[in-house]
Amino acid sequence: MSRAKIEISGLSKSFGSKKVLRSLDLDVPEGQSVVVIGGSGTGKSVLLKCVLGLMEPDAGSIRIDGEEMVGASRLTVEQLRRKFGMLFQGAALFDSIPVWENVTFGLLATGRIERRDAREKAVETLARVGLPAETANLFPAELSGGMQKRVGLARAIAAEPEIIFFDEPTTGLDPIMADVINDLIRDCVKELGATALSITHDMASVRKIADRVAMLYDGRIIWEGPVADIENSGNAYVDQFIHGHAHGPIQFGQPARSA
Amino acid sequence: MINPFRIVGHGVLGACETVGEIVLFAFRAVARGLAGPYYLHQIWRQMVDIGYYSLPVVGLTAIFTGMVLALQSYTGFSRFEAESAIATIVVLSMTRELGPVLAGLMVAGRVGASMAAELGTMRVTEQIDALSTLSTDPMKYLIFPRLLAGMLMLPLLVLIADVIGVMGGYLVGVFKLGFGPVEYINRTFEFLQAEDVISGLVKAAVFGFLVALMGCYQGYNSGRGAQGVGTATTRAVVSASILILTANYIVTEIFFSR
């Protein structure tokens, strides 16, 4: 396995008395797509926010290319974020500016592109996610949910990041559009040669975009392996989750202590 | 059993914590904003939103306040034959007190609420998180332009409100109460000093900062969902209004002691 692009070790995060992450360990190998699966409220989004530097963990370490992110200065975190692209669950497009400005926002903010060249770059990036040039002048409110996701993806890849994060990329989309987004994610990540870390509970998405899968339960990664092994994980929790059975070791309100 | 000391203590500690958070929020926004880069487009947009779009509501408030002031002063002052002081009363009341306070409260209702709702929605829809991931500090991009615009535009609005308020008094004084136009204008400027106007403008700058600060703080820290945004909006208007009235006394006291 190639070297780890993201190394997470001993990551803990609590909200009051609720322990969401309990000394979580996870490595994301360079150039691979790792998908973290888990039920609602298991801490997937908290994990992602900690890695993005949007939330300060209580303990543990997050290293990006060997550089520590937890407790780092604001400047270091900002420098590390330049390697990131992120597709948010609801796309999180800025509704006061047109699509082309949304797509090139990161490039303009960091001075990596001149304003006069931004529109052309946006049109080019929109084409990569299958959107016509006319979309560039629209405002986010004028787009359908699927188009918003595509624009969000275009914004995530516009700066050709080394690492791309996907937060529930297919939530709220019909199955066909979800498959289109999955294909786009797969293609974009491969084209860029980027490392990807996604969180989802959509198994169709997992099977399409993952190289490796990690299951988060009770604040820890309880199983991790190649996507091809997920059907034969030998883990009762994983089996229950991927087949969506109501009965099994995962009980609502009764988190297990060991896998 | 209910322990009153515990309830009071909890309330006091909670209030202290909130005040501390607001002060730190303001400090962080100003310090980071001043360090640049400056988002001039954002600053301009906020200046237009706060200054230009608040003009109708502030203007209407000012003209009717000036008119009422003239009428009420006449009713009271005619009892001891001091009607000639009406123009002075109108101009001093408008410039020193009513212009800044009423404009501040109107802007708190219009702009403070809209800032809290906009930022709250941005928080709920993860747009603020998105800004951070795109190497843009939300403090510099969202908060500082609003604070700066609030501080710059409210004095301008108050200056206009002062003029419109005096004009309202003039209309009532001349066309209803029978004062001569020249006499009314002369009386208006007879006892007016630069400090009267300046103290009002200083108040306006403080109020503008407070309105923007409360709108930004409440919106930025908004809770989840529609209810969270609604609560943030209400809190922004209520807290800004209370702070305006409190700061009004403090600034008046400072000018009064000089």
Image (tube, coloured by chain):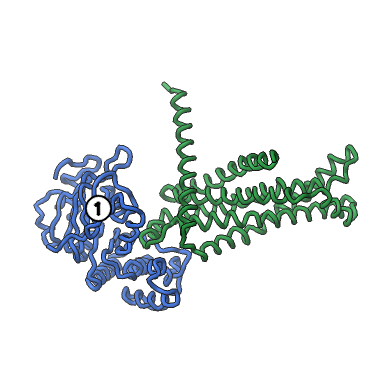
Chain colours: A blue, B green
Instruction: Give the x, y percent position of residue A199.
Output: 26, 57
Can you tell which quarter of the image residue A51 is in? bottom left
Residue at horizontal 19 percent and vertical 50 percent from the top: A25
Residue farthest along the front direction in this orientation: B258
Question: Which part of the image, by quadrant, shows the C terminus of chain B?
Answer: top right
The mark tally for this picture is: 1
Residue A135: tell me if it is visible. no
Can you tell which quarter of the image residue B242 is in? top right
Residue farthest along the top direction in this orientation: B1
Question: Which part of the image, by quadrant, shows the N terminus of chain B?
Answer: top left
Residue A96: tell me if it is visible. yes
Residue closer to the observer: A116 or A143: A116
Is B70 placed left or right of A76 in the picture? right
In the rendered view, would you say A192 is above or below B234? below
Tell me the amino acid under the disc marked 1.
Ile
Output the chain of dot 1. Answer: A
Residue at horizontal 75 percent and vertical 46 percent from the top: B93
Instruction: Give the x, y percent position of residue B101.
Output: 66, 47
In the rendered view, would you say A197 is above or below B1? below
Check disc 1 and report its element: helix, strand or loop. Answer: strand
For disc 1, the marked residue is A62
